[in-house]
Amino acid sequence: MTVKLVGRIAGVAIGMAAATACVGGSSSVSEKDKLALKQYVLDKAPDSIPQKVEANFDGKLMLLGAKLEPAGPVKAGQQVKLTMYWRSDKKLDAGWNLFTHVLDGSGERILNIDNVGPIREWKETRQALPPSAWEPGKIYVDEQTFTLPNNVKTAKVSIVTGVWREADRLKIVAGPKDGDNRALVATLETSAAAAPPPPPPRTPMIRVDKLAKGTKITVDGKLDEEAWKSAPATGPFVDVRTGQPNKEFPVNGSARLLWDEQGFYVGFEVRDAKLTGGFPKGAKDPHLWTKDTVELMVDPDGDGDNKDYYELQVGPQNLVFDSQFDDYNAPKQDPDGPFGHQEWSFGGKSAVTIDGTIDKDDDTDKGYVVELFVPWKSFTKAKKSPPAIGDVWRLNLYAMQGGGGVAWSAILGQGNFHKAARFGKVLWAEKGWPAAPAASASAAASGAPPPSGSVKIPVLGKGPTLPLAPAPPKP
């Protein structure tokens, strides 16, 4: 079984020389290389392996364990020798290679040593003795040497490893692993002082006052009603890893929110110089995150526990992906889905206006606007829907391209875009609430923000309007 790395994981880079690999490439090893590497192939495992791992890669390979020299605290600039012991249980098809990452205490990768070591020496399209060439029943000794960087700042570093082919990683079905199908080999103490980590940026909160009775919002993708002009706004979306202003990702975005007795409205404004659709007209639940899209995550209970939450995406073609999840990223079937309960339908409306041309690479686009209406009745697993005045839900909003994106509330490396504990908070309120000074003081003590003022964001130039997406059938 393999797992596609199509990036619903924020900030994860492969960086494993995949550009030179070819799927189905030759796994044959020359007789000269076999002879030179003979000492790294054993009939049985050593009687004692200091660091037990026992990570099972899809029933085909077993990482038995490892040996680290030195095993104790390591100083910056000091050399470390890592020896891993792999057992081949079933023959792999062609194209698979090994990778190893060294991570600091925050989980950031500080070293990539994929092709370091005798059996990993890169030979045009593969490593010298890749897993694809291993014989079932044999033990393979995987020696690697690296130098701990001088700028390491954490008191511990960890070593992770795995098996890759182009954009796939061999799935780990048992043993210590992280969320990216990397086996946890070992943790090393360093001589770096354990500085206390800086406090993470607080999740943002926004107050949204209920629309006055009789206020009508037409879902046409234009955001031109008076209510939108004074609607509470998120401000510019930020880098999902750092929470800082987006300076690198090619897409930028912001959003505004409204609500009434029937549901809530979201107006996304996305800056995107290259609009990509790429899906058939009328496609059902297309994988919009692989192209251009906006994304809305909703945790109606507001507790951030990732139980019973919802996902909704709309791309510039006004196609919709919507699903409901029981738990963090669950259920899902890698690599192609379904992801969550895709039979769930948000039951609302969406409309898109674009400023540019979709799937036309020889021009420069400006972006697109997505307008959404999401009915309260869609949230069938919410403890309370619609919310009462003063209730807080958790939402996150993203503008995405090719699996990455920018967000209202940064994830900060704490998982992927589904991490509900990092969703922002929306306080559902109404004008004049709270009414009494005592209630106002109580709200302030609880962290509820004061009524929001008018925040205006320039609306993109009006482009062609796509027709309203019809309300999907009830699940």
Image (cartoon, rainbow, N blue to C red):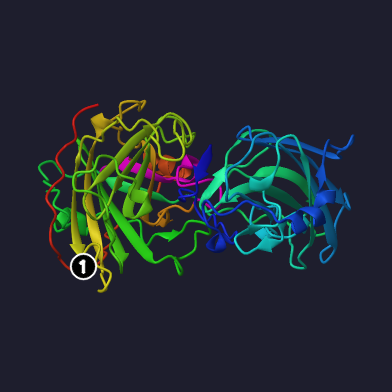
The quadrant of the rendering that contains the C terminus is top left
Instruction: Answer left or right for 189 relative to 343.
Output: right
Image location (x, y in percent) of residue 192: 80, 60
Residue sitting nearer the eye, 62 or 345 = 62
Residue sitting nearer the eye, 272 or 137 = 137
Instruction: Answer left or right for 71 relative to 239.
Output: right
Residue visible at 44% across and 45% down in the picture = 423
Image location (x, y in percent) of residue 144: 78, 56
- Say which residue label 1 marks: 356
Residue sitting nearer the eye, 29 or 230 = 29
Q: Residue furthest bottom?
A: 363
SS under mark 1: loop
Image location (x, y in percent) of residue 305: 49, 34
Residue visible at 89% across and 53% down in the picture = 70
CA neighbours of label 1 inside 10 A, class few (<14), some (14 to 19), many (20+): many
Residue visible at 63% across and 38% down in the picture = 91
Q: Which residues are magenta?
A: 411-430
Residue 419 in magenta?
yes
Instruction: Answer left or right for 326 relative to 294.
Output: right
Image location (x, y in percent) of residue 327: 47, 31
